[in-house]
Image (cartoon, rainbow, N blue to C red):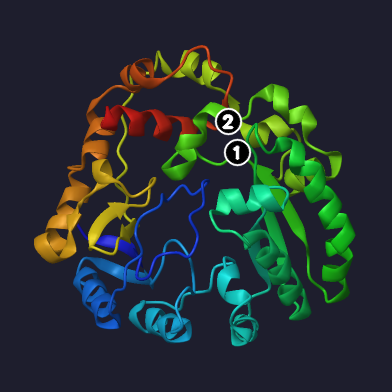
């Protein structure tokens, strides 16, 4: 099979944070050599018309040689890559050259995450001082004419702190300050998918009864960001409703497509970009098995999770691992991934 495009994302150095909402999960940081990214990428090139390369899939620009890595990824990619609107706030407050570099490559907006007050944000990010660093990062971005885009993940234990975030946005006058340099401030909130670290927060996942507690300004920003008219369209449906629908769905499905994205962890294990990199999704190891075997495993759905979704009816997965009484809110695709991950583990 000749792929149209393969995107390779390597967790070369890991992440400075240990976020409790992270759908990618928390794993030990690595220290890959630059030569290893060249070797890994070259292995994929004969299997695809185009190959796109990124040196990270958790924290962008984490290490000191971020400029070198960005240039290298562009050199190794078939087509020029653009810097995502995701940046390292850890680096923003420690490296005065970083924001200048971001501006020089044309970045106009950068996303930051706040969970509520200082204590709550530090708790969710897993690092004391993170909240203060985020506030400092906002000022650094605005001073260099890069618009901050703030997201908030809400659960039952931080939804009452949304008023703090609303006051913070107004106090910092973010909308007007971005407009002053021709930028655009935006904000959105959601519950996130229920995989990786976020799956551990299942018990405190929001229900429809929680949504009226969202302040009007934050609700307005969120609807605008997602292009929705109703906040329930952002948060999806109750697990009870999804269970009722999907418990009669006998379909199976494949995750194979002609333009896949692969995650390569610090040990060179490879996973498809479906959910958190984990054992049920592992396609093999680049160094031990080689690219050909890894791609064959992907095409043939040989990972446990892919094989399960391809051969086990959705209704059986849902009835085995779903909760038909739960009022927790999910989008449909996120719920299917949630129950599939549980099914593959237990």
- Is label 1 in a helix, a strand or a loop? loop
Q: Nearer the viewer, residue 242 or 86?
A: 86
Residue 94 lies, in percent from the top left, at 59, 79
Residue at 26% of width from left, 39% of height from top?
A: 306
Residue 75 lies, in percent from the top left, at 37, 84
Numbered disc in front, either 2 or 1 = 2
Mark 2 or mark 1, earlier in chain: 1
Residue 31 bears which disc, if any? none
Residue 244 lies, in percent from the top left, at 48, 13
Q: Would you say the residues marked 2 and 1 are in contact, meaning their CB atoms lie under 8 Å apart? A: yes
Residue 150 lies, in percent from the top left, at 70, 57
Left or right side of 305 for 202: right
Residue 191 bears which disc, if any? 1
Quarter holding the N terminus? bottom left
Classify residue 158 by image quadrant: top right
Q: How many marks?
A: 2
- Is label 2 in a helix, a strand or a loop? loop
Q: Tell me if mark 2 has few (under 14), some (14-19) or many (20+) residues whose alpha carbon lies within 10 angstroms of its own.
A: many
Residue at 71% of width from left, 36% of height from top?
A: 159
Q: Which residue is mark 2?
A: 205
Q: CA distance from mark 2 to mark 1?
A: 7 Å
Instruction: Judge whether 266 appears above or below 237 on screen.
Output: below
């Amino acid at each position: 099979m000749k792929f149209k495009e393969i995107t390779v994302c390597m967790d070369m150095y890991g992440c400075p944070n240990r976020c409790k909402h992270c759908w990618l999960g928390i794993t030990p940081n690595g220290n890959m050599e630059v030569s290893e990214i060249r070797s890994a990428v070259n292995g994929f090139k004969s299997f695809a018309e185009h190959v796109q390369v990124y040196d990270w899939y958790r924290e962008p620009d984490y290490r000191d040689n971020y400029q070198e890595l960005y240039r290298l990824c562009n050199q190794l990619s078939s087509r020029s890559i653009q810097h995502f609107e995701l940046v390292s706030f850890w680096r923003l407050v420690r490296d005065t050259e970083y924001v200048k570099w971001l501006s020089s490559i044309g970045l106009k907006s950068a996303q930051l995450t706040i969970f509520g007050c200082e204590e709550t944000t530090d708790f969710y990010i897993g690092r004391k001082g993170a909240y203060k660093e985020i506030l400092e990062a906002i000022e650094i971005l605005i001073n260099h004419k890069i618009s901050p885009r703030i997201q908030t993940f809400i659960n039952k234990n931080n939804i009452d702190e949304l008023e703090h975030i609303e006051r913070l946005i107004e106090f910092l006058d973010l909308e007007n300050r971005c407009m002053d340099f021709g930028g655009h401030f935006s904000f959105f909130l959601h519950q996130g998918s229920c995989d990786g670290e976020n799956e551990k927060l299942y018990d405190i996942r929001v229900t429809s009864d929680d949504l009226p507690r969202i302040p009007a300004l934050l609700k307005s920003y969120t609807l605008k960001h997602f292009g929705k008219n109703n906040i329930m369209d952002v948060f999806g449906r109750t697990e009870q409703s999804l269970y009722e629908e999907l418990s009669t769905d006998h379909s199976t499905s494949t995750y194979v497509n002609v333009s896949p994205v692969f995650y390569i962890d610090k040990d060179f294990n490879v996973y498809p970009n479906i959910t958190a990199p984990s054992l049920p999704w592992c396609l093999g190891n680049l160094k031990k098995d080689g690219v050909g075997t890894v791609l064959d495993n992907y095409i043939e759905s040989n990972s446990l999770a892919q094989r399960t979704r391809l051969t086990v009816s959705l209704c059986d997965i849902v009835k085995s691992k779903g909760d038909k009484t739960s009022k927790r809110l999910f989008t449909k695709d996120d719920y299917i991934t949630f129950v599939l991950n549980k099914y593959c583990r237990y």
